[in-house]
Each structure stands twice: as C-alpha cells, then as structure tokens.
Image: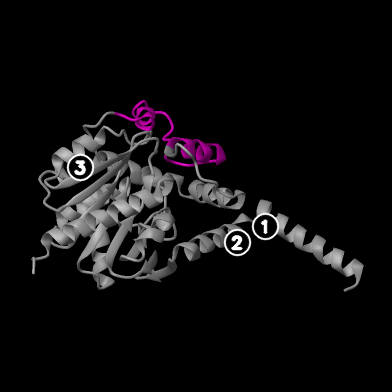
Amino acid sequence: MDTFLFWFLLVLIAVATGLLWWVLPAPLARAFLALERLRCGLRSKRAHGWHFLEGGKGEPLVLLHGFNADAHHFCQASRWLRAHFRIIAPDIPGFGDTELSERSSLRIEDRAREILDWLDRMGIRHFYLGGSSMGGYLSLAMAREAPDRVRALWLLAPGGLHSARHSAVFREVAEGRHNPLVVRNRADFLRLLDYCFVRPPWVPGPLQRFLVARGQRSSAQAERIFDAMRHDSEPVETLARNLSVPALLIWGQADQVLHPDGATVVQTLLGDCESLILPAVGHLPMIEQARTCAEAWVAFTESRARATTPAE
C-alpha cells in the first residue's frame, strides 16, 4: 500500500473514532453494551412492546432492575446463572429501551400486575423472581399478587420500606434537596456512582455520556415514577408481611442508597427468608460482587429443590 494512503487511512480512522468517542457517543455506547451481553451470554430482544435480555437454559428466572437503571445491571451475574436458569431481564417501562405508556399507573402494585401480564403474554406462568432495589420492591408486590406463580424470591437491597433507617441518599430526599437517584448531568451521574458502589466499575466515556443523555431526557418522568413509589404505593411492610414465598435476601453492608438495617426489617416480615450481608459492598451487589451473589442464589435454589424432592 502507498505510504501516503496508509497514513491517510490511519488518520481517517482516528478522526472517525474520536468523533464517535467525543461527539456521537451513542453508537459506541451501544457497541459496548452489545459486547457485554455477548460476554455474559445474553441477547437483546423485543416482545409485546418491551425490550428485554434473555439467555441461559433451565427454569425461568425473571430479573428486575432498580430505579433509573436497565436490564444490563444483571449482565455480570448472568455469567454464573445462565447454566442453571433461563434468564429473562426486561427493561421496566419508563427505563432503558421500554417506553412508558401515558395510560400506565405508576403505583408499585399496578406496575407489578403489568409485569405479570407481560409474562403471561410471553407464555411464562411459573418462574423464579429476582429484583434489585426498585426491582425488589416490584418483586415483593408480584409475589403478593400471585404467590402461586413465584417459586422463590431473590431480593437485592429491595426498596419500598418505610420503617427502615434513612440512608445518605434518602436523607437528601427527605430534606427536599435534589434527588441523587435522578440524573440531570454528568456531575449527577458521577455522584450517583459514588453513592451506589464502594468500588465503582469502569464506565467508558461514550457509555457515560450516553447514560447521562438518557437520564436528562427522562428526568421529569423519573421524578414522577419515584414520587409514585414513595407516596402512592403500598409499603413493603404491607406487601411482605407473612408472605409464604421463600426468599434469599442480599444486602451490601456499605449501602448508601437503602440503609442495610432494612435487611432486618425485611427478614422479620417474610415468613421464609435467608439473608446474606456482604461487607464492603454498596447498593448493587450483583454488579460489585456478581459471582458471590449468583452462586449464593444458585446454592439457595438448589438447597430448596433438594428439600422438596421426595427421598427415593
């Protein structure tokens, strides 16, 4: 190849990469997410108007992400789950790539029924159910609504408690300051990372800008969803009381979003609950300690399966 042409193409590639990296981050961000799904054995799909991730084999495990997140929060844990379960992780309407209908109620109980209806349309009747933060709150509401459909619950620092001690984040919310969970700019995003993790994961620049832009576009809607959870929905104290579905509860001891003392409250409410408190872990243990959380869940479900299998 001619030397001039070689250097011209090299410069052209560098300029194009720089343009994508700094000016048009969305294509590179989507590529980063696609690579993460590929590494973790998940595929991006759409059905009945919802975006979701799916992978693995076995009995269905429905995984619900937290507030202002999306299904990719369960990618890393899926590496150790996919050999045991068929993973179905939807973007809950209003987050990720699933749009919120203007007619949708934002109350947790109604949103739980909406997810159950979507699972019906997917042909999924009985399933294991896991949820992080808001997703844990939704999981408890789904189990309250349809306990016969949920084989077991995997609760990762579930939200919705009214009697637990206020965390650093909820002290700010209670004092009427800006809600740290709602992202309006890059400073908000970086601050939220510090709140959610003891050891924040590396987030590539294009993916940061993509997530910040998405947060900016949906910030008003996110505020409405948060307010409906906080003021218009039944608390976990009502939804979880004497619930008979077996549950594994995992909480990071250094959680600044939902105070880890909430674990004691949840365990007291549920009729059949095992708990695991992870030291030096923040609000998203399935990201910060993905393998530990996944293996604990697999061990929990296998021990329950052995306990209910008749001896030969």
Residue at 29 percent across and 61 percent down: it is: 62
Instruction: Judge from the rendering whether residue 158 lies leftward or rightward of residue 238; answer left or right.
Output: right
Cα distance in 3D space between marks 1 and 2 = 7 Å
Q: Pointer 1: what residue?
A: 20
- Label 1 or label 2, whichever comes before in sequence order: 1
Decide if residue 165 is in sight here.
Answer: yes
- Residue 272 position within the rendered picture, expressed as x and y whole percent measured from the top left: 13, 47
Q: Give the range drawn in magenta.
A: 166-195
Question: Is 162 placed above or below 212 here?
Answer: above
Q: Residues within 10 Å of mark 3 (few under 14, many from 20)?
A: many
Task: Name the residue type under label 3.
Answer: Val
Residue at 18 percent across and 54 percent down: it is: 143
Q: How crowded is mark 1: few (under 14 residues within 10 Å), some or many (20 or more)?
A: some
Task: Name the residue type under label 2.
Answer: Pro
Residue 27's disc number: 2
- The quarter in which the N terminus is drawn is bottom right
- Label 3 or label 2, whichever comes before in sequence order: 2
